[in-house]
Image: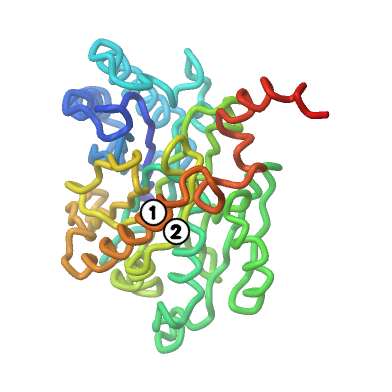
Amino acid sequence: MSKITLTVIKADIGGYVGHCSVHPELIEEANRVLEENGKGLLEDYVVTHVGDDVNLIMTHRKGVDNPEIHKLAWDTFLSCTQIAKRLKLYGAGQDLLSDSFSGNIKGMGPGVAEMEFEERPSEPLIVFMADKTEPGAWNLPLYKMFADPFNTIGLVIDPKMHQGFKFEVLDTMENKKIVFSCPEELYDLLVFLGASNRYAVKAVYSKSGEPAAVSSTQRMNLMAGRYVGKDDPVLVVRCQSGFPAVGEALEPFANPHLVAGWMRGSHFGPLMPVSCKGATPSRFDGPPRVTALGFQLAGGKLVGPQDMFADVSFDRARQKALEMADYLRQLGPFEPHRLPLDEMEYTTLPQVMEKLKDRFE
């Protein structure tokens, strides 16, 4: 049997209401288009959403960057956009930066995370999906999953993991990448991972080159040349048998960390782990959310999903995130709740500052 490819593609094609959620008709339309047009292309698919983003989770045997698969996703989003416009949903089609497909969806607006691998005898994996934040939001969780023995005991006691992992880090401003081998280059890795507004983990591999995790690293505002919303990234993590256990992959989200995004993409806020039902950010358009869908892959079929963050053991993480949100909201337009000025240049603030520039003496 040929290798399986898991492709996750997301796009914000219209919020309901405002930036809160996705209208049920968009989910229905995405399912219809994938069912009709995916025959002969897809092994399986699941359509879901987090906040106002539609997420397409697809398996196939076409490899990564396949034009047919990417066009299928593009056509799905275009069809959904027509419904979004009819319903006058907010920001209808905002993640589609072009009117025509160019062979690869990367660089056209939607976020893409995909990997190709040999399906193991048991292939558990988790698809993480975030809203109201940017690709650097995965830096700390991926560091904890694949490099921190206080989070992942398998790094210490599992001989299949003991040698560590390789991190592929992308400079999202320069579009250059660098690979660090850990644990031996751990401190060098952290120099860059800590600057999550610029550097993002694109992928994690075993030392033998087997893909372990892959994220979407598209920066919408850099591609569009103007502010069109945060990137709302996705992340795929393979689990067990040489990779972090399912519980080790989920554990970093038990202690919410601060990420850039939230209201107007201009604030720091806690990344709150929620069930799919709770993925409707409305308080100050937030706080930022992350959902986790677990699957068992079987012959290319997506057995699931299991809603991993619906577990009551994440209730305290949610409570802590809400307390963090209370504190930050008291700061209003002041840093460190509002992003620093060098990051605000990718929001709508420059248009306000331009009006005032001549008043400086």
Q: Amino acid at mark 1?
A: Val
Q: Secondary structure at mark 2?
A: strand
What is the residue that sits farthest to the bottom in this orientation? 157
Task: Tell me whether circle 1 and circle 2 mark residues in contact (CB < 8 Å).
Answer: yes
Position of residue 50 relative to residue 119, above or below, is above
Instruction: Identify the residue position indicated by label 2 in the image.
Output: 213
Comes first in the chain, label 1 or label 2: 2
Whether residue 237 is visible here, answered yes or no, is yes
Q: What percent of the width, then of the height, locates residue 72?
A: 35, 26
Residue 166, x across and y down, in percent: 57, 67
Q: Is residue 267 left or right of residue 72?
A: right
Q: Amino acid at mark 2?
A: Ala
Give the x, y percent position of residue 319. 26, 63
In this view, which residue lies farthest toward the top?
Answer: 86
Which residue occupies 22% across, 56% down?
298
Q: Which mark is residue 136?
A: none
Q: Is residue 180 above or below residue 224?
A: below
Question: In which quadrant of the rendered image does the C terminus lie?
Answer: top right
Question: Which of the 4 image quarters holds residue 141?
Answer: bottom left
Pointer 1 residue:
236
